[in-house]
Amino acid sequence: MAKMIKLVSGDGAEFEVEEEVAFQSKIIKDIVADADDVIPLPTVSSKVLIQVIEYCRKHAAVNSFPLSPSSSAAAAASSSSSISYSKPVSDPALRAWDNEFVKLNNSSLFDIVIAANYLDIEELVDLVLETVADRIKGKQAQEIRRQFNIENDFTPEEEEALRRENSWAFQNN
Amino acid sequence: MALNFSSRSMLPVPFVHSDNESYLSVFEGSQICVYPFLSGWEVVNAFDCVVGDNQSLSAIDDVCDPVDLLPDDPFGMELNRNMGAALDGLFKASCRDFFGWSLVCSPETQFNYDARAEELDGWPIESFEGFSVNDSLDEESETGLIDGESLNLYCEDNTHSSGGDEGLPHDGLIFSLRYMDLRDLLSLERVCRSLRSAVRNDSLLWRSMLIDSPLSEKITDDVLLQLTRRAQGNLQSLSLIGCPRITDEGLKCVLDNNLSLKKALHTHFALESLINTRCTLFAIEALLSLAKPMLIPMLHIPGCVRLSLESIINILKEYQSKCSPGIEQLKLGRLFSVSQEQYEELKLLLHTDQHQQPQAQKLRFYYTSRSSLGWVDDRAIDIEMCPLCKKYKLVYDCPSESCQGRGFTQCRACDICIARCIQCGKCIKDCRSNIYPKDEKKMVEASDNVKNTLCYRAYDQEKRYKLWKFEIHLQSLSACQLKPYRRVYELTSLIYLQLVIGSSAGGLGAIPP
């Protein structure tokens, strides 16, 4: 029977997961090596932990199978792009699952990324941040404020100064 | 800077090609070669407008999915704001945990967009301004609907948010900064104070600067200096792809700024790439003289049309004699024509004899060279002798299984001898057989990679785009400056011509723009 690890969320809920699922998180992997199998995670809420576990479960299942030659070629190809921070997910089905997974609102995504960063799950951090980055790409400041619900705390003078400074990038002439 | 030629001509007339007439007639006769953006010529400014504004150009980058080209809000309904406001009234009123709802109602994802549009089908958008679920909600919904911007759209933000108060950017947003390109960073800078300081003060964000279109056409020396200063001396990679407004002095300033700081720290400054079509000899010399105490392991100059190979060799000789081990890698790209003597001399200068030649060289595929920054290998010099034309060029291998099956040396040549698809790097003849067979059904079965169906079209469009872009750069030069580049222009035109003739010979009919 697979070894189970118990994760306890910030609000006291307990989640039992298989070892290989929990080990997607490097932090948990290190802790389990030293100590016992009950790991309290006070900064992670239940809701976020459920989502993180779901991600880990899916990726643990996939990672246990070796890459096929075609998918490894695809991985090599896609890693030649100019911005890539982690190994790209090579399996198209998994990529599609990931894309569905991140169809959440901004605040949920941010909570997940904070948790994933705390738990050191590199792929999840990159996945979420790339999604957030895509939502920001190409947008003007006002749109970004609206989307992420950020207050404009500049004085009018500051705002004007900024606008002038960066006008070279946004002019279309 | 307006282009001064007739909007009806297919090619800029002032650049008189010796075979101008026949050149044009090939184009006109075949009806294939129409630049997809020719109709916009008369309103185009040399650098900025066309790249940024023209819809067709973005089509080239997003060849795969025409849906992405559709505008988000064609009728100006501002669906995001109004719907969000209306729904928030709903949420606030019912005060339930909307965990399930959050998946459906977030305005920024396309998936949710459709779901909501479906739900609200039949309700005129204007009525949302006064929307209320029932009478008891009137108070909240009224305040909720006044200004969609300041509303907190999702209930759970108030209970679960770990990012601090409403109105401040979430910590997670700060994490995402490193995934942003330059333009987005500049947009984010203007959002609020904390983001401004996060963008400006994090030197790690500015360690590697890549300036590509559309910003490359707009950036000036001052701006470049200001931005590179943000690296606080940690600038490790500077890539300027086609920046016509950057002058040698500006570049020198940037290098001065960062090298002097680096000197103090006794660290290793590796100028990984410097790609600038206007980069002159002076700049390279300045760069090398400034960097004398430092090690420059790689010199990468694929786009520098103003440099001649002789001058490069002379500079290298001087630099290598003064620094040891000096430059170890030289990337020339495609614009230089190299004779055998020059090639041998370069190899000697780069100490290739002393290096241990790895037995199995990494395979080079055409598509990876598109963004030359992405290509990393151990070779001292990137060009080699093409087995077919015996000239010194960039030589590519073929990733197609059939070619590899016949041995690695089979489908190996420069991209002029063997045309390749920019999407997958396979030789075009291989792709073509999968694209236009007579039987539609066979097309899907025949290709082992569905992307092949786009290969030829993408290749064609990309080549046209590159040729066009190159012409735009040439436009900015005066007639006497133009002369040395005619050869380069001829070379790129030849590639295009080969493509067009090849396609019409193959009986493919009109290639859709």
Image (spheres, grey):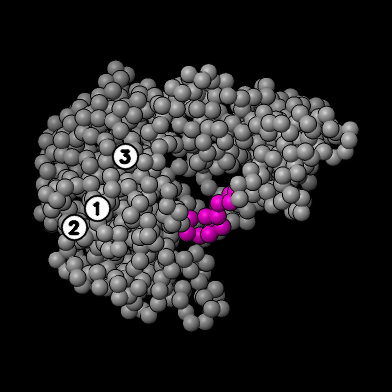
Q: Which residues are magenta?
A: B61-74
The reply to whether residue B178 is in sight is: no
Label 1 lies in what chain? B
Look at mark 1 in the image and give the residue it sits on: B4
**Crowding at label 1, few (<14), some or many (≥20) Cα neighbours within 10 Å?**
few
- Identify whether B75 is placed above or below A24: below
Query: In the image, is B345 to the left or to the right of B150?
Result: left
Are the residues flagged by discs 2 and 1 from a single subunit? yes
Q: Which residue is mark 2?
A: B14
In space, the residues marked 2 and 1 are separated at their CA atoms by: 9 Å
Q: Amino acid at mark 3?
A: Leu
Q: Secondary structure at mark 1?
A: loop
- Could you tell me if the residues under marks 2 and 1 are in contact, i.e. CB atoms within 8 Å? yes
Residue B69 lies in the magenta-colored region: yes
Quadrant in which the C terminus of chain B is drawn: bottom left
Mark 1 vs mark 3, CA separation in Å: 27 Å
